[in-house]
Structure formats: C-alpha cells, structure tokens
Amino acid sequence: MTSPPLRSWAPDRTMAEPRVDRPSFMTMIGRGARNRCPACGEGRVFSGYLTVAPACGHCGTSFAELHADDAPPYIVIFLVGHLLVPVIFWVEKTWMPPMWLHMAVWLPLFTIVCTLALRPVKGAVVGWMLRLGPVGDQDITMPASRARGPDDA
Ligand SMILES: [Zn+2]
C-alpha cells in the first residue's frame, strides 16, 4: 500500500486558457500573511479571525485541504519568545522590579502580541502549504486567466 503523492498548487493545465506559472514561494507566503489568496492575490484566506475560508472567493482555489494545525502557534511562540524574553531579562537586570509587576506587564503583553501575530503567521503558513503541497491527494487548480495578482508583473 502506497500513500498518494503530495501535490502543490498549480494552475489548471487542462483548460484552454493561456498557461501561467505558479507565483514564487515568497510571493505566496507574503500574500497569505496579508490575508490574500496565495494563488491569485485577490481573494481572502480567512473567513473569520483564524478560520480559513473553504476556497478563494476570487479564483476558487480550494483551501479546504490545508490544515495548518499547530505550526502557526509554534512559530508565533518561537518568534515572540525570542523578541520579548531578552527584554524581560534586560528589565530584570536593570531595574529588578517586583514579580507582581513583571506578571502585570509581561503576561498581557505576550497575550496581545501573540494574538496579533497569529493571523498573519497562519496566513503565511497557508501560502507555504499551498506552494509546497502538503494537501493530500486532491488536485488544487484554478483557471489560468485568474491566476495573476496585482503584485505580479
Ligand atoms: Zn484566489
């Protein structure tokens, strides 16, 4: 028994429209981080704050098989921890504030920064997954005429 090959998104080559190349890796990640469809750059990735839409409203690229799971929170915790923990150590070493003040400042700050960072990071992960293809055995396609976005020359 063999598992189906992992496929990445590609324009539909079976249609009679002109062929286009997939956007670059960084283009798809950037579009996802800005809540834009990684494939066309026009539609939206999210239908709620962190709920991924079933498909792009502009080009119809399916997002239903993209499950980011724990990757976005892992990346956010990694990044925010590396940004804020050195500041906490510096504040402690410089002023030695009481522990209740640390808790009153850093816990809400961590919560706010992580909450704000989670959506763009999850969008970037969706773009990353759409480009590299961990989407199971379903073929994700879109009409070639709608694959160009505003930031493509
Ligand atoms: Zn789209």
Image: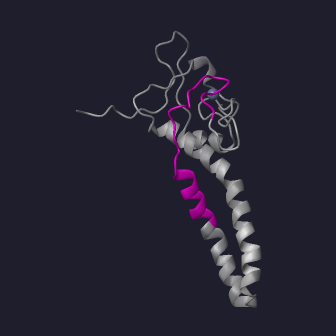
Prevalent SS, magenta region? loop
**Could you tell me which quadrant the N terminus lies in?**
top left
Q: Position of residue 90 (x, y in %)?
A: 69, 83
Say which residue appears at 45% left-offset and 35% top-offset.
135
Relative to 81, 16 lies left or right: left
Q: Position of residue 58 (x, y in %)?
A: 67, 23
Q: Position of residue 66 (x, y in %)?
A: 52, 37
Nearest to the observer: residue 152 or residue 62: 62
Indicate which quadrant contains ligand 1. top right
Q: How many marks?
A: 0
Give above or below for 56 relative to 129.
above
* Residue, far top: 16
* Residue, far front: 100
The figure's colour scheme reads one colour
* Residue, far left: 1
Q: Position of residue 36 (x, y in %)?
A: 67, 36
Residue 70 is covered by the magenta coloring:
yes
Relative to 112, 71 lies left or right: left
Say which residue appears at 69% left-offset and 56% top-offset.
115
Q: Quadrant of residue 117?
A: bottom right
Q: Quadrant of residue 102?
A: bottom right
Q: Magenta segment range?
A: 53-80
Q: Quadrant of residue 106?
A: bottom right
**Could you tell me which quadrant the C terminus lies in?**
top right
Say which residue appears at 25% left-offset and 33% top-offset.
2
Give above or below for 100 relative to 13.
below
Nearest to the observer: residue 129 or residue 52: 52
Residue 65 is covered by the magenta coloring:
yes
Nearest to the observer: residue 71 or residue 32: 71
Give above or below for 103 relative to 19.
below
